Amino acid sequence: MSTSPPEFNVTGIDYAERRHLRYTGPIIDFHAHVMVTRPGDPPTGPPTGKGPGATIEQADAMLDVGQDFGVMQTLTMCPPDDVAPLRERFGHRLEFNAMINKRTANESDDEAFRNLERFLELGVKVVKLWSAPRGRERGLFIDAPWRIEALKRARSAGVRLVMVHVADPDTWFRTVYADAAKFGTKPEQYVGLERMMQLFPDLIWIGAHMAGDSEHPDHLQALLEGYPHFYIDTSATKWQVREVSPRAEAHRTLITRFPDRFLFGTDLVTRHHLTREHYVSRYWCQRTLWESDWVGPSPIADGDYTASEGGPTTPILRGIHLPDDVVEMVYYRNAQRLLNLPTV
Ligand SMILES: [Zn+2]
């Protein structure tokens, strides 16, 4: 019988070793999926939101681990039904981000609007336009007419922040998205985003996962320069570890040049059968990547990484060691300002 190491620690690292993490202030996680979980949830993908055994134990475990890393508040995407139980348990530790979405291609615009309406009644501060290429079949174009209408309604209700998922890793455009006629090229993903930022210049736009393009810091710079209302979150840990590390100097320069435009995020998702160490691994790697000069093989398994002959089986994590005042802005001040939260 052989056991392979768990995905959250393939190198057998000691996560209690945190002397390289020098920031001691509060952190806001601007991108996470803290949800109610159930034993019948699929192992990946969105939860069913129905069925027996609903619990917030995973949310409790994740936020508890987060607190250990200094994460005091988290902006979460969850189904509207989850907002009340999560709020009751966690109070001001959570803020909510509403997906403007369709689960199937047949879902009507009205259903999407009704869903949004529920979120708005619950007082969400952010809306999310998930527009990965794999969503095109469901009509999830960032600038689809029903999304433009939904955004106008959200704006009328006082929402000022829009998070967007645009594109995906470069590697995926060579594999899963190789059919460019169906999915579009990677640069084509950004045409709709720029159109939306021009249509809604009064809103703040947040590009999730290093705006989907940590492979090209020069492109991120062009977006930040061209659109003063554009921000970037650092989430999707494996992706950023893999693609920021080899461009450590360029990313350090970029973030230091626009320190008020980046937001710490993990993209952690609560899932019914996860162990605490899974959550630990993402917080540990995110903080290590941005604030430290730690260098070594990433402890997290990464299916998108191709190992070289005889090289490590995971990508090298190379901390970019942001200056102290920049770390404080990225980890806390920028999110606190955008979400209009009292300082802790
Ligand atoms: Zn996410």
Image: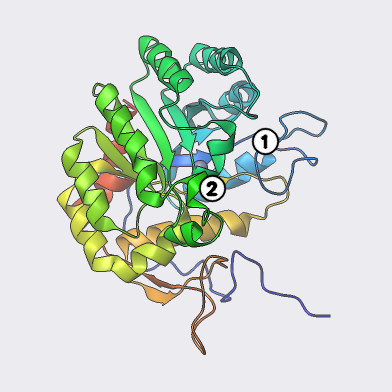
Along the line of sight, the residue nearer the viewer: 142 or 232: 142
Q: In which quarter of the image is the N terminus?
A: bottom right
Mark closer to the chain start, 2 or 1: 1
Which mark identifies residue 268?
2
The x and y percentages for residue 234 are: 37, 50
| Left or right of 223 in this view: 60 | right
Which residue type does callout 1 highlight? Ile
Residue 185, x across and y down, in percent = 41, 50
Q: With respect to residue 60, does 126 lie above or below?
A: above
SS state under label 1: loop
Q: Relative to 192, does residue 157 appear above or below in the rendering?
A: above
Q: Identity of the amino acid at label 2?
A: Leu
Quarter of the image where one finds residue 188 = top left
The residue at the point 73 percent across, 33 percent down is 48
- The residue positioned 18% from the left and 47% from the top of the image is 258
Q: Please give the name of the residue rendered at 62% of the width and 35% of the height, measured from the top-left corner.
A: 35
